[in-house]
Structures are given as C-alpha cells and as structure tokens.
Amino acid sequence: MSRVAQQGGHIRTNLRLAFDGSVVIDTIVSNGADSRKFSTQARWLFDNRTLRLSGTQTTAWKILKLNSWSMITADQGGAGLPVRWTAFPRVNLKLWLLIAAAVLLPVLFALSLPRSKPSHAIADDPQYVLPTTSHQAHRQRR
C-alpha cells in the first residue's frame, strides 16, 4: 500500500502481487468528500532491481529498497519522488474464528453448568447431614 498526499487530495494505491505473476492495482483518489476508485489487472516481472508491470500500459520502477515489510520505488527516469510501499500481513479470518471458538466454547460450557451451593449455605441447612465414612463410624463407636 502506498499513500501520497498531493494538492489537498490523497492517492492510496494497493498493489497485490501474486506468486503466479498476476497483479491487481487498486487506486483511490480522494479530494475532500469526492473520491474515485480505479482497478487494473496486469502481470508483474522482477528483474535486476526493477519491477515491471505489463497490462493496458507498461510501467517500470527502480527498486531502491526492498525488505519483507517495505519497498521504496522510483520511476526509471528519476524525475518523480520516491514512493514508499508498506506491506500489511494478510489475516486468515477463518483461522482466528476457529481459535476463538476453541477458547470460548469450554469457558461457555463451564459457565452453563449448575453451580453448587456455597459451603456456608450447606452448613446452615438443617436437613443436610454430614457424610460419614466407615472409618469415622468405626471411630465413633469406640
């Protein structure tokens, strides 16, 4: 994703490069409350520090910096300003929902179980008889 502010407006470009060589470019140009969205599909090729996009138009950018989280590109002529691209990790929503369900279901099940009486309520109950074991009964007979 790249964001550029220009003359009171903003240009946000999402560049999605797939492993199969396809690319989707979504551009949103906004100026105040007015915004327009453009979407383009193309093919990408990376060779010798150059990113080439071929579609209805062909463009090439020099890659000035590239790591796992960001890329800085400049046009081949060097007349434009460098553009910083920031990578955002994809979130697998299904995986997170499964993890949340695995954590929450046992908790919800435990909360739905009937609760036992507190010990002071049992002790105050005149009909409650303390359980005796055979060892205790044997001791009391002596």
Image (spheres, rainbow, N blue to C red):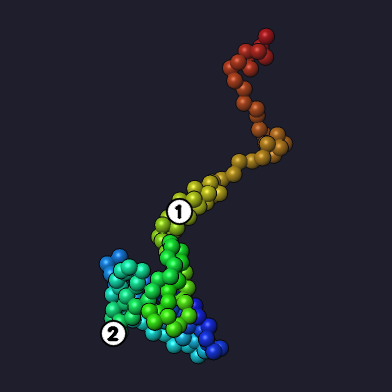
Instruction: Answer left or right for 14 relative to 7.
Output: left
Q: Earlier in the sequence, mark 2 or mark 1?
A: 2
Q: Find residue 19 and name its label.
A: none
Q: Secondary structure at mark 1?
A: helix
Question: Is residue 87 among what the camera can see?
Answer: no
Task: Say which quarter of the image contains residue 39.
Answer: bottom left
Residue in the image at 45% along x and 82% along y: 80
The x and y percentages for residue 31 are 52, 89
Question: Is residue 9 among what the camera can see?
Answer: yes
The x and y percentages for residue 129 are 65, 29
Please name whichever residue, 102 or 47, is drawn nearer the observer in this view of the structure.
Answer: 47
The x and y percentages for residue 28 are 45, 83
- The 10 Å Cα crowd at callout 1, few under 14, some 14 to 19, many 20 or more, is few
Residue in the image at 56% along x and 49% along y: 111
Residue type beneath disc 2: Thr
74, above or below 111, in the image: below
Q: Please, which residue is most extreme toward the top here?
A: 142
62, above or below 8, in the image: above
Please name whichever residue, 96 or 5, is drawn nearer the observer in this view of the structure.
Answer: 5
Tell which tag, 2 or 1, sits nearer the viewer: 2
Instruction: Answer left or right for 44 relative to 98.
Output: left
Q: Quadrant of the C terminus?
A: top right
User: Label 2 belongs to which residue?
Assistant: 56
13, above or below 132, in the image: below
User: Label 1 belongs to which residue?
Assistant: 99
Residue type beneath disc 1: Ile
Residue in the image at 49% along x and 86% along y: 30
Instruction: Answer left or right for 123 relative to 25.
Output: right
Q: Quadrant of the N terminus?
A: bottom left
Q: CA distance from mark 2 to mark 1?
A: 43 Å
> CB under 8 Å between callouts 2 and 1?
no
